Structure formats: C-alpha cells, structure tokens
Image (spheres, grey):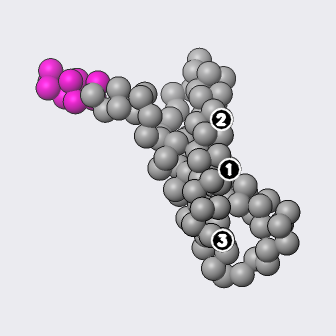
C-alpha cells in the first residue's frame, strides 16, 4: 500500500468512524453509561481494519504479513484521527475544570 492510498483511506475511515460513534452516542444515550472513548476506539478499529481488508480484496492484493500489519495500523490510526474532535477537547477541558473545583 502506498502512502498516498493509506492517507486517502485514513481520511475516509476516520470520517466514517466519527459518524458511527456519534450514531452510537445518540442511540445509547439513555440506555447505558458508556465510555465513549472506548466506543470510538472499538468502532474505529472495526471500520479501519475491515475497510482496509475490503480494499485489499477488491484490488486483488494478497493478505501478507505486512498487509495485515497495515490493517491493524489503519484501525489504530483511524481511531486516533476520529477521536481528535471538538467534543474530545471540550470533554478534556470540562474534566480539568471539575478537578480544580475539588
């Protein structure tokens, strides 16, 4: 996989991961007290790894050891990119303010 294709797939998967995480937040807001950072990471791992596997399959790229490592790295990278957003910054600031009040 070239660096350019990695970055193109990363941007697509991170956007999709953010949308899926927001959907899960809206569905599960009243049902459970979930850690949304964990939900975002799990959904990004699934979307990033699965999307990369689909890319390999559609382009007839063999599943070698290096390509499987790229699948795992794509999952982690899409998780990192999708979790850096306004709500994560807001959550961090809110946690810092709450700790100062204690």
Q: Quadrant of the N terminus?
A: bottom right
Residue 97 in magenta? yes
Of badges 3 and 1, nearer the viewer stands: 3
Of helix, strand and loop, which mostly describes the magenta segment? helix
Q: Is residue 56 left or right of residue 94?
A: right
At 65% from the left and 35% from the top, the residue drawn is 20
SS at badge 1: helix
User: Which residue, as the protein is rendered here, is positioned at the far front?
Assistant: 4
Q: Quadrant of the C terminus?
A: top left
Q: Which residue is mark 1?
A: 47
Query: Separation of disc 2 and disc 3 at Cα?
Result: 25 Å
Label 3 packing within 10 angstroms: few (<14), some (14-19), many (20+): few
Residue 38 % position (x, y) = 51, 43
Query: On screen, 98 above or below 84?
Result: above
Q: Which residue is mark 2?
A: 20
Viewer-proximal residue among 66 and 96: 66
- Residue 59 is tagged as none
Viewer-proximal residue among 43 and 98: 43
Viewer-proximal residue among 94 and 6: 6
Which region is colored magenta? 94-102
Residue 22 % position (x, y) = 59, 28
Q: Is residue 44 visible?
A: no
Residue 25 in magenta? no
Q: Is residue 56 left or right of residue 16?
A: right
Q: Which residue is mark 3?
A: 1
Of badges 2 and 3, nearer the viewer stands: 3
Q: Are marks 2 and 1 in contact (CB under 8 Å)?
A: yes
Q: Is residue 28 left or right of residue 84?
A: right
Q: Are marks 2 and 3 in contact (CB under 8 Å)?
A: no
Counting residues from the N terminus, which is met first, the one under dot 2 or under dot 3? Answer: 3
At 57% from the left and 66% from the top, the residue drawn is 3
Label 2 packing within 10 angstroms: few (<14), some (14-19), many (20+): some
């Amino acid at each position: 996989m070239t660096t350019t294709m990695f970055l193109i797939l990363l941007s697509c998967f991170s956007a999709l991961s953010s949308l899926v995480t927001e959907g899960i937040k809206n569905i599960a807001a009243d049902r459970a007290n979930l850690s949304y950072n964990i939900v975002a990471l799990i959904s990004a791992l699934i979307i990033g790894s699965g999307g990369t596997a689909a890319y390999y399959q559609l382009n007839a790229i063999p599943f070698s050891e290096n390509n499987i490592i790229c699948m795992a790295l794509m999952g982690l990278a899409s998780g990192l990119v999708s979790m850096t957003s306004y709500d994560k910054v807001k959550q961090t600031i809110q946690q810092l303010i709450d700790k100062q009040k204690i």
